[in-house]
Amino acid sequence: MKRVILCIIGLTALDQVVKLLVTRFLIDSRFAILPSVLYFRPHQNTHLGFFPSLFDFVMPVYYSVLITILVGLFLTICYRYMKFMTFGWNKYKCLPLMYLVLTLSACICSFIDNVAWGGSWDFIYLVNLFIFDFKDAYLAIGIVSMVFYAAAYGVLYERKLSKEERKEASKSKKLLSWVKRGLPLRPDMMTNTTN
């Protein structure tokens, strides 16, 4: 847990230090990182979110903070449920932790961007698509890692179970039952103690 917190702090600090350097020394700079693909182009997104910027809508800071907190909680619950569902399966076990570290780092960076900077300082321009920063990359890589982990689990483990084994496993891993039991990380914590 200590390493997770240190990684989150480190990634958040990296994102914020780079933004500080960009705004202090490189605000008017423009150059190719990968010609015809990636460019360095600082731009402040003051819409406080991806969807508000698509519709040219400026979201109030308090809504943005609330959404960021809710997204962080949702991403943490997704991590816990995935760990619960795949308990005992040891392949690619670093991926859920990578997902947690990257997505929570992205949420904290977003919170700081909206409160301290008044919006996100994006600086990496992907030609004809969008402009992003490290926080956006953290979020994308984190989500891709969890999707890969879930797909690998389904293909490499669950698919090899017999119908009876799958049916039995699905009984013990129901979402509502899991929530009622307090979001445990392991199925053996699901035993019914209230008779």
Image (cartoon, grey):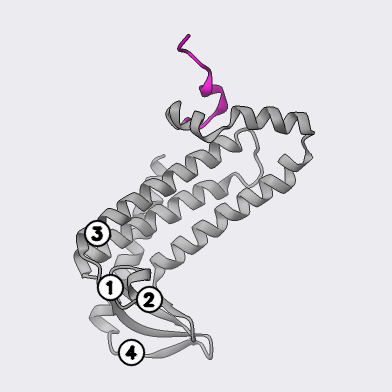
**How many tags in the picture?**
4
Q: Is 117 contained in the magenta span?
A: no
Element marked by disc 3? helix
Of residues 74 and 135, the one drawn nearer to the viewer in this rendering: 74
The structure residue drawn at horizontal position 58% and vertical position 54%, both measured from the top left corner, is: 147
Q: Are marks 4 and 3 in contact (CB under 8 Å)?
A: no
Say above or below: 176 vs 65. Answer: above
- Spatial CA distance of label 2 from label 3 is 17 Å
Q: Tell me the mark number nearer the camera, choosing from 4 and 3.
A: 3
Q: Earlier in the sequence, mark 2 or mark 3?
A: 2
Percent position of residue 6, x then y:
37, 49
Q: Earlier in the sequence, mark 1 or mark 2?
A: 1
Single out the mark in the foreground, 1 or 4.
Answer: 1
Residue for badge 1: 47
Q: In which image quadrant can residue 45 be found? A: bottom left
Name the residue beneath numbered marker 4.
Answer: 29
Q: Amino acid at mark 3?
A: Tyr
Could you tell me the amino acid type at mark 4? Answer: Ser
